[in-house]
Image: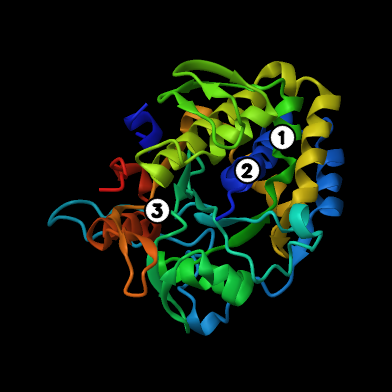
Amino acid sequence: MTETAAVARKRHPWRIAWGVFGAVVLLLVSIGGVYAFTLIRTFDTQTEKISNAFPADAVRPPAAPAAGSTAVQPTPEPGAATPAPVAAPTTPAQNILLLGSDTRGATDRDLAGIRGERSDTIMVVHVPADRKNLYVMSILRDSWLEIPGHGTAKINAALSWGGVPLAVQTVETLLGVRIDHVAVVDFAGFKGVTDLLGGVDISNPIGFESYHLKGHYFQEGALHLNGTEAMAFARERYAFADGDFQRVRNQQLIIQAVLVAIMHKSVLADVGKTTSLVSSVTPYLAVDEGLTSAYLTGLAWELRAVREPEVEFFTMPTNGTGTSSDGQSIVNIDWSALAAVQNGFKTDTLGAYQPEVQTMG
């Protein structure tokens, strides 16, 4: 069960960045080979490549078991027949880190060499070995932890201090698993994506007056949002007693709505619209050198049966908010509860994890 389902400084619309990246994957999953080649070329030519995206192997967790390896068989009971060896999944589990940045939109700088910017959007997409689901974990940007080589700080400082490699190392250290791929997403293109889809439909759990869209009130209940409205909805935190926590839940609502709209047959059957969607997404992506069209197409094929209900969202366990020794407002990580999440990532059993609603406490 997703966390969303369980409960029904400068802020930027790319906070729901993973949805744009996921849209590229799910589009390729759904459209098959008729015109996927054109979209693949678009992905290759319009995305930036991040060289040296990962920290040194010496400080990284081990990679997932190699594809095609044989699983260790348990010892049979006395008198029982020896079971035949069981092959491990032909594809290992994958972890993809998504970092949000609006650098290009604000400064016209590239995304691949980003540094000096804090990543307010941090999400880890876990692709299980059986390829039957996707799990997306949001990490609150103010989570207080050890940044390798820099002492304790908010997690979003890692990108600012050491670029993508330090951000990757920080998340790998936090979860105890290797990040296989990383993408930096500039969400400036989100408005156009939403409008190309004809808007998105959500069920708003809490009515509020928008801080970012002056004079607009988002009523509780069913809403149809255009691109401008969706960005304002996803960015809001000031209207909520629960601040960032409610904003993350709202972001997940928007992501799900975007995926539902993308998967609609009227979109997938429209070659022009699908091509326009991918073209509007890829200029706002920077990816590691291994995240190629070949990798993406292979992953898309493996995930071909996955639809919106199989995409599960949750937020990393927290223990309320607090204040650091130097006076910063921070989010405390619930290290005890995090152990179950770490185990889920390490053993590829996130499907068994039951998230709890995260609040300011």
Label 2 sits on residue:
13
Specify the farthest residue to the left.
Answer: 78
Q: Residues within 10 Å of mark 3 (few under 14, many from 20)?
A: some
Distance between the Cα atoms at labels 1 and 3?
35 Å
Q: Earlier in the sequence, mark 1 or mark 2?
A: 2
* Residue 345, image x, y percentages: 39, 56
Which residue is at a point 20% across and 56% down the rendered structure image?
76
Which residue is at a point 77% across and 63% down the rendered structure image?
49
Q: Can you say which quadrant of the picture contains the N terminus?
A: top left
- Rendered image: mark on residue 348: 3
Quarter holding residue 265: top right
Marks 2,3: beta carbons within 8 A:
no
Label 1 sits on residue:
191
Left or right? Give the position of 238 relative to 330: right
Disc 1 vs disc 3: which is toward the camera? 1
Q: 333 above or below 255?
A: below
* Residue 106, image x, y percentages: 75, 55
Can residue 215 be seen by looking at this rendering? Answer: yes
Distance between the Cα atoms at labels 2 and 3?
31 Å
Left or right? Give the position of 262 relative to 94: right
- Rendered image: mark on residue 183: none
Quarter holding residue 108: bottom right
Which secondary structure, mark 1? helix
Distance between the Cα atoms at labels 1 and 2?
9 Å
* Residue 75, image x, y percentages: 22, 61
